[in-house]
Image: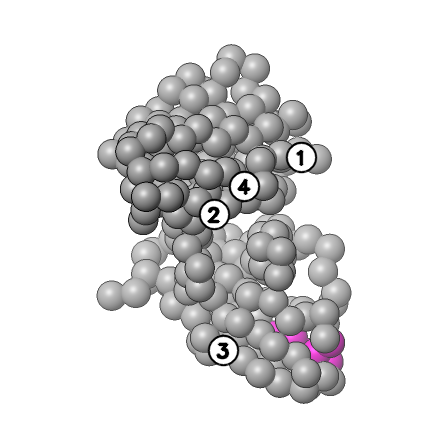
Amino acid sequence: DTAVSQTPKYLVTQMGNDKSIKCEQNLGHDTMYWYKQDSKKFLKIMFSYNNKELIINETVPNRFSPKSPDKAHLNLHINSLELGDSAVYFCASSQDLAAHRSYEQYFGPGTRLTVT
Amino acid sequence: LAKTTQPISMDSYEGQEVNITCSHNNIATNDYITWYQQFPSQGPRFIIQGYKTKVTNEVASLFIPADRKSSTLSLPRVSLSDTAVYYCLVGDGGKLIFGQGTELSVKP
């Protein structure tokens, strides 16, 4: 069984389109994250949700909107896609962030987004 | 805001011990230090985590000095399959800061 899954694995789209990436975890974790990894392999956190509540919201364009229907799911919706949005997006989950301040995260396989 | 610094790349040979150091000057008092391994086209994978002194598991050791401003990941007797990018992660006031990653290349 896949612990953290993402769909789709690849996403090719044109500038200006709106797209969503879905993430699900079956680990029973309370916290989920979205990361962006650029072509230089820098990993940058975008959002973190704990029990469906937004905890971390880094400075990302408001075209990016996370949505958590329940604590097992954290989807990422992107409006008006731009060339600079091309990257690999990773979803991750961990135990309660606030309780232990530890960051043993389990990552999904990534979604490679290409904007043309 | 914590800033983390790692070497960009390292080379090693099979069977050698590899030590990768991460500097994190402004780590918060309660924050842990975590290391991840990433292979091409995969998500990062947890290796080891620690708070202070030394932690050892079946794949690696983590050394953290008393001031906690740095940490060293030690991989004993590396093999070709250890070729990957290694990231350190520290928290700072709720922010999670990954290092830029160290690309380790293990040669036969």
Q: What residue do we see at 40% from left, 31% from top?
A: B18
Tag 3 and tag 4, C-beta contact below 8 Å: no
- The residue at which mark 3 appears reads as A10
As drawn, A64 above or below A14: above
> From mark 3 to mark 4, how far is it between C-alphas?
28 Å
Q: Please name the residue shown 37% across and 44% down the image.
A: B107
Amino acid type assigned to the residue bearing label 1 in the image: Lys
Quadrant where the N terminus of chain A sits is bottom left
* Disc 1 from disc 4: Cα separation: 18 Å
Q: Is residue B79 left or right of residue A88?
A: left
Q: Is residue B46 visible?
A: no
Q: Could you say whether the residue bearing mark 2 is in a helix, strand or loop?
A: strand
Question: 10 Å neighbourhood of mark 3: few (<14), some, or many (≥20)?
Answer: few
Q: In front of the other: label 3 or label 2?
A: 2
Cα–Cα span, label 3 and label 2: 22 Å
Disc 4 on helix, strand or loop? Answer: strand
Q: Secondary structure at mark 3?
A: strand
What numbered label is drawn on residue B9?
4
Disc 1: host chain: B
* Residue B56, position as x, y percentages in the image: 31, 26
Residue B72 can be seen in this image: yes
Is A31 or B66 nearer to us in this picture? B66
Mark 2 — residue?
A: B85
